[in-house]
């Protein structure tokens, strides 16, 4: 097997042969990063027409999942519910080949992968939305069933240029939950604000400096986001809160969200 970190005659980084199973956002971003790093990479999937198209857009080779060739590392980047099934399909094809198979899920246990192959996790802590996603910008949480598995996956992270750490499945699941609060819920709040502005004829762009300032403040080194909390709930401004709740009459979903978050900030002061 070829070790990562070698340099060929053209100055490109050589690496393990890598197969990325999947053709969604995470798979595409990973393929682009691997290709840019000079790794030999193949994108594989069950939908041949789609995987051919996406692989072409990423500038990498492609293969039907049922016909994948042996690789040193196989990264399964599919939906959480499909990890186990796809892992079995990969093991049917590559059992005995010496491959390490890892998935990219934040919540699925490493044990969901078929034990006929060495197993691991290669979880990028980043929200992938398509287009300009940069896999190398994601901190990678790595797990492996042996020192060799961890070593291969950590070398792959180094070649991509990602920061990485070893983390077990249970701790990774807790981190994933934190990420839902820190990212998914924050984006949902912004979507609600955008919808409210649209409904009321207000330019949502007026809120963007506020959003950007909050992101900068809460991500400064050593800052506890709780110390950055502002607004009527933080001040205990009951009359303003009552006014907001009156404005939300008839918007039951937004009112429930408003009340839940206000109660979380105020604690026992919220009535």
Image (cartoon, rainbow, N blue to C red):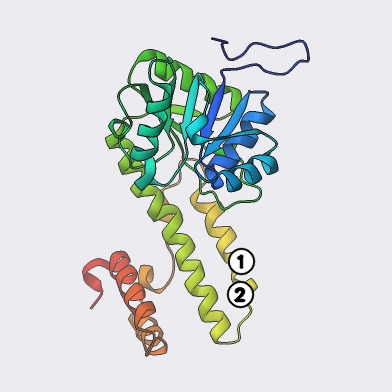
**Residue beneath the point at 44% across and 37% down:** 104
Q: Residue furthest right?
A: 10
User: Please, is residue 95 above or below residue 113 in the view?
Assistant: above
As helix, strand or loop, the secondary structure at mark 1 comes to helix
Other residues around mark 1 within 10 Å, as few (<14) / some (14–19) / many (≥20): few
Q: Residue 93, located in which quarter of the rendered image?
A: top left
Q: Residue at x 25, y 74 (%)?
A: 270
Looking at the image, residue 27 sits to the left or right of residue 94; the answer is right
**Residue 52: where, in percent of width, then height?**
63, 42
Q: Position of residue 184 (x, y in %)?
A: 44, 57
Circle 2 SS class: helix
**Among the 4 quarters of the image, the one containing residue 141:** top left
Quadrant holding the C terminus: bottom left
Residue denoted by label 2 = 204
Could you tell me how far apart the alpha carbons at marks 1 and 2 are, in whole angstroms?
7 Å
Residue 25: where, in percent of width, then height?
Answer: 55, 47
Give above or below for 188 relative to 10: below
Instruction: State yes or no: discs 1 and 2 in contact (Cβ < 8 Å).
Output: yes
Residue shown at 60% from the left, 83% from the top: 202
- Give whichever of 40, 244 is nearer the camera: 40
Total number of numbered discs in the rendering:
2
Q: Is residue 30 visible?
A: yes
Judged left or right of residue 199, residue 229 is left
Relative vertical location of residue 215 with respect to residue 80 in this rendering, above or below = below
Q: Is residue 174 above or below residue 202?
A: above
- Find residue 159 and name its label: none
Residue positioned 24% across, 72% down in the render? 269
Q: Is residue 215 left or right of residue 93?
A: right
Q: Which residue in the protein does label 1 denote? A: 208
**Can you see residue 121?**
no
């Amino acid at each position: 097997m070829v070790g990562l970190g070698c340099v060929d005659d053209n100055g490109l980084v050589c690496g393990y042969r890598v197969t990325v199973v999947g053709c969604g956002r995470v798979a595409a971003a990973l393929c682009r990063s691997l290709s840019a790093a000079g790794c030999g990479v193949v994108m594989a999937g069950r939908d041949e027409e789609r995987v051919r198209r996406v692989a072409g857009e990423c500038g990498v080779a492609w293969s039907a999942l049922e016909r994948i060739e042996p690789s040193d590392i196989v990264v399964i980047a599919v939906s959480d519910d499909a990890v186990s099934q796809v892992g079995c399909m990969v093991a049917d094809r590559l059992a005995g080949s010496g491959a390490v198979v890892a998935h990219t899920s934040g919540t699925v246990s490493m044990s969901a992968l078929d034990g006929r192959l060495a197993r691991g996790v290669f979880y990028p802590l980043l929200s992938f939305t398509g287009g300009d996603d940069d896999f190398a910008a994601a901190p990678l949480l790595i797990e492996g069933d042996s020192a060799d598995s961890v070593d291969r996956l950590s070398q792959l992270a180094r070649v991509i240029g990602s920061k990485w750490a070893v983390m077990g499945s249970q701790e990774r699941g807790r981190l994933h939950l934190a990420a839902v609060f820190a990212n998914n819920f924050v984006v949902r709040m912004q979507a609600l604000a955008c919808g409210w502005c649209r409904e009321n004829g207000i330019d949502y762009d007026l809120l963007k400096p506020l959003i950007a300032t909050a992101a900068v403040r809460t991500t400064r080194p050593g800052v506890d986001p709780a110390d950055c909390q502002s607004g009527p709930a933080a001040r205990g401004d009951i009359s303003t809160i009552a006014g907001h709740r009156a404005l939300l009459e008839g918007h039951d979903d937004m009112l429930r969200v408003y009340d839940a978050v206000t109660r979380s900030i105020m604690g026992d002061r919220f009535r």
